[in-house]
Amino acid sequence: MRLIGSKASAGGNYLRAAGPNEVRCVVRESLGFYRSLVVGGIFEFAKPVDIRSISTYNYALRCCIDSHPRLSVVIADYDTDSPYFEFYPRIDLSQHVQFLDNETRKGETEAMAIQRNLPSILDEFLPTSIPSWKIVILPFSDKRCFIALSYSHALGDGLSGCAFHRTFLEALQEQRLESDLICTPTRKELSPPFDTPENLPISWAYLLSPFLGQYLPKWLSSLFGFSSEMNAVTDSTWTGTPIFYDLETLRTGVQLISINGDMVEDALKLCRMNDAKLTGLLHQLIIDALSEALPRPHKFDRLGGGTAINMRPTVEVSNDEMGVFASGDFQIYPLQEKSLGENGQFSWALAKEITDRLAIRSKEVKDQPLGLLRYLLSIRAWTLSKIGARREDSYAISNLMSFQPLGNVDNCAVSEMIFFNVISVRGGPMNITVNWQAGGLNLGAYEDEVVFVNTVCRHIEAGFARLCMTLDVSEKY
């Protein structure tokens, strides 16, 4: 029996077959539906450096390649159902560094410059003939720049980008200048795929539910509890337009929200006082914002929310290891009245409910939806079949939490991080990056979508501000 992703050895550089979720990531990218994952940060050097020279970053990149084997692999047979990883023995660093024009526009802040450049980074195809990653550098001065890691999702999840930046930042403390652009990495084995039958066992009942739910009459499926969809999205769930893809017109909209460090600390204190986590609170504020912002009149009464879950702790893998170790949770939520009542009291019920659910899901390995991928005959055909279908959720959150350096940051520090979704730095701001497929919100022209997203963002910001006002001064310290 040949499992999806299996492949006979292709020679001395063969490493291993891609796991089912890695295959899913490869397929999305080979079809053009998904371009790259981006994790970036604002780096500030203690002394002036040649901010636009590869030699400034050469040594740090070599350290990253040596520490993270996935940076020295290519994905072979990427346009099939059986891609596999091959070791790439000679890396030309000039092919993995891109400098953006640092010409700022009148009245433009650093955040505005980053937001302006992010869509082009997200929408660019990464090459597949060389390792599919690069750093993109947007200079601000001779001591300060934004550095984004753009990489194939098959090489790593969001936390993989944090692992890269921790290694990169630690190496920059030495500030070595190297001019040789050719890197010859040591061949290292990749860790096994995360989504194996041993890690993610699937029961017969869970396996048969989506398949029988699809083919049995609806009354019979309901009688036996079988569902054709793991996510109970209905016509009254706001999910935007059906899934579509046009290579020529694909465009990603981006909007940044920044919550200052003091407000983040206050929100965390309130979360602890109310037995909730920040991700649960974010869900509640987003649901509040969408409930308020959806143009009326409308027919919707619920939202579908997705959450990326880091499964590294469950399978005893370090957060410093690059790889695809994420699963997901999907839940339906009714549209909400404002969480902050007229009496100034904030209702924590939903945030706590979501927190409790995610705590359970993050420790569960049996019957994870991700485990069903290995039973598909063709992940490629399954992915293509989604074109024209209803989207699976209204929004999704991936919270990478607080970025923390490996050691001292005397010579170079990271003051802010950017990720598509949520990330923060210790003692600094939490940045939320909202991105959407232009035309996918079903709200009219792209300009109308921008207005809607801006409204949602302002609601979230206002929600944090109002929430933190409920914290008594004596509770702040």
Image: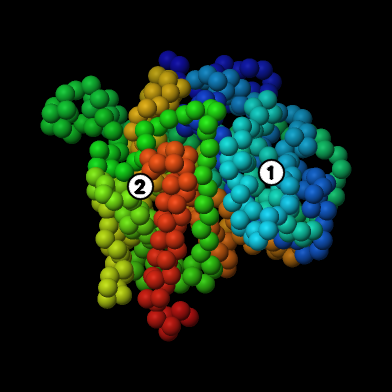
Q: Quadrant of residue 123?
A: top right
Q: Residues within 10 Å of mark 2 (few under 14, many from 20)?
A: many
Residue 86 lies, in percent from the top left, at 64, 26
Helix, strand, or loop for circle 1? strand
- Residue at 26% x, 49% y is 297
Q: Which residue is mark 2?
A: 305
Residue 49 lies, in percent from the top left, at 82, 57
Q: Quadrant of residue 210?
A: top left
Foreground pick, 45 / 51 = 51
In the image, taking residue 254 as reference, residue 274 lies left or right, namely: left
Which residue appears farthest toward the bottom when viewing the image?
Answer: 474
Which amino acid, mark 2? Gly
Residue 246 lies, in percent from the top left, at 49, 28
Quadrant occupied by the N terminus: top left
In the image, taking residue 185 as reference, residue 8 lies left or right, namely: left
Instruction: Compare marks 2 and 1 and give the one earlier in the sequence.
Output: 1
Residue 135's tag is 1
